[in-house]
Structure formats: structure tokens, C-alpha cells
Image (cartoon, grey):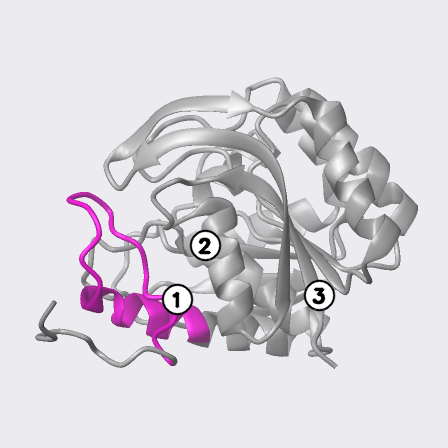
Amino acid sequence: MIRNVLSIAGSDPSGGAGIQADLKTFSACGVYGMAALTALTAQNTRGVSGVQPVPPQFVADQIAAIFADIRVDAVKIGMIANAAIASAVAEILTRHRDVPVVLDPVMIAKGGAALLAADAVDVLTTQLLPLATVVTPNLPEAAALLHEPEARSREDMARQALALSKLGPAAVLVKGGHLESDESPDVLASAGTITWFETDRLPTKNTHGTGCTLSSAIAAEIAKGLPLPEAVASAKDYLAQAVAAAGQLSVGSGHGPVQHFHALWADNEGVKR
């Protein structure tokens, strides 16, 4: 049976992040993807120039319409935009506590633009974190959620993962992509246990949407029945290959997207058009 996964997130018209990246990832990972939009953005590979949030009640209406008709095997939450949307999403998902939730606390775009209003951080922390099967912050996001300085070492990462787990989520995956290292380690805190996932850092600027892609891949693997540690390992392997194959694409002049369909598309370089 093909599993169904719902993404609740913002739109990226350049296709590399947000809802667009989520749906590509779901397809590549073999699940049926659905989407409830929280915000429209004007952005490309060089940055975000505008954000238009969707009215909170309409965000809730989109989610309710899905649950009223379609079996949802997992939910991925990305860009929430503001406190009112965070509350609306939390209120409706509270009615579906049996569905696994992967929460990617999107706060800042790759180019530095804010994607979450300052007053929404506490709402996200108190209302959405307790609903999460796993929350997947990067180092700046983990620091913001804890109101602490950003982690600078593996020890800091592990400590912050455990601290975040005390705020209600079943598990926390702190991503080490911002760590100053030749590697890109992630740490999973679950039931008081720490598990490390190791990945070599690849020399590329094509990293637009990596957080969206990883969290969506985790949601897909959980929907298919994998236990969380195995889901994280599978998702990280998928993302590493997508980043490694990003050079096959020619999209924009800034931080380009990863190659979500690296396992499905032949290298088209040199094909005449």
C-alpha cells in the first residue's frame, strides 16, 4: 500500500525548498504527497524578497479537508510564518494525535531572510513541539528555540538536543550542517538516548532546501513504517546523494537546489535541445 504524507509549509516558486521540495522528496521516496500552504514567498536561489502568509483559518481549512477525506500516514510541518498560523495548525493536529508529525522549525531562509515572526517562536515551542514525533532544527534554530547561544561543538549539540526533548517532542534531531567541521554530523535525542549520524561535508553551494528535503524524507520513511533511527539514516543517505548530484542541475546563480530525483533521472548533460 502506498502511504500518504501531508506537508504543511510555505511555497518556494523557484522549486528548491518549501512545499515544492517536499512534494519532490515524497515522490522520490515512494509516498503520495499532499500539501497545505501556510505562506507564499517571492524567492529564488539568491534570496527571499517577499512573504505573504495565508489566513490562519484557511490554513486550518486546508488541513481539515485532507483529514476529512484522505488517510494521512504522516505529517511534515515546515514554514509556519506567524503565531496565529502556528496556533491554528496545532489546534487541528491535536485532533489527530495518532498521526506521526515531523516538525522542521523553519526560521531563516538560506539567504538570511526571516521566515518566522519573532512572536511565533514561543507558540511553536509550547504548542507544536509537544505534538512532534521528531523535531529537526539546525544549529541556529535549536539555539533560538532554547534562547541560548548557537552550539559550537558536538557536546553542545547533544546537550541542546536533550534540552529540546524536555519541551515535549518524542525525539529531537539537531542538524550539524552549520558546525565548523569537515563533517556534517547530526545528533538524535530519543528517550534519553543519544545517537550520532555521520556525513562528510560536500564542497557545493547547492544546498537550497536541504532542511526541507531531510525532514520530508524522514516523514516519508516513518509513514512507510521504519523506526525513527532507521528513518533518519535512510533520509540522510537520500539527502547526501541528492546533494552530491546537485551539479546535474542548472538552476539559478545563488544557492541552487539539490537533485531530488537523482535515482530516477539520467544525467542529461550534453543532450541537445
The disc, 1 or 2, on the residue closer to the chain's N-terminal end is: 2
Q: Is residue 160 left or right of residue 261?
A: right
Q: Amino acid at mark 3?
A: Asn
Q: What residue is disc 3 on?
A: 4
Mark nearer the N terminus (2 vs 3): 3
- Magenta residues span 238-263
**Distance between the Cα atoms at labels 3 and 1?**
18 Å
Residue drawn at (53%, 58%), measured in percent from left and top?
23
Amino acid under disc 2: Ala
Front residue of 49 and 204: 49
* Element at label 3: strand
Q: Residue at x 46, y 70 (%)?
A: 236
Q: Measured along the vertical axis of the image, is residue 110 above or below residue 210?
A: above
Local packing at callout 3 (Cα closer than 10 Å; few below 14, some 14-19, many 20+) is many
Tag 1–tag 2 contact (CB < 8 Å):
yes
- At mark 1, the secondary structure is loop
For residue 21, which numbered disc appears in the image?
Answer: 2
Is residue 251 rendered magenta in the image?
yes
Q: Name the spot of residue 105 as percent of width and height, x first.
A: 57, 41
Q: Secondary structure at mark 2?
A: helix
Q: Is residue 262 above or below residue 5?
A: below
Q: Is 113 left or right of 130, judged from the image as shown? A: left
Q: Earlier in the sequence, mark 3 or mark 1?
A: 3
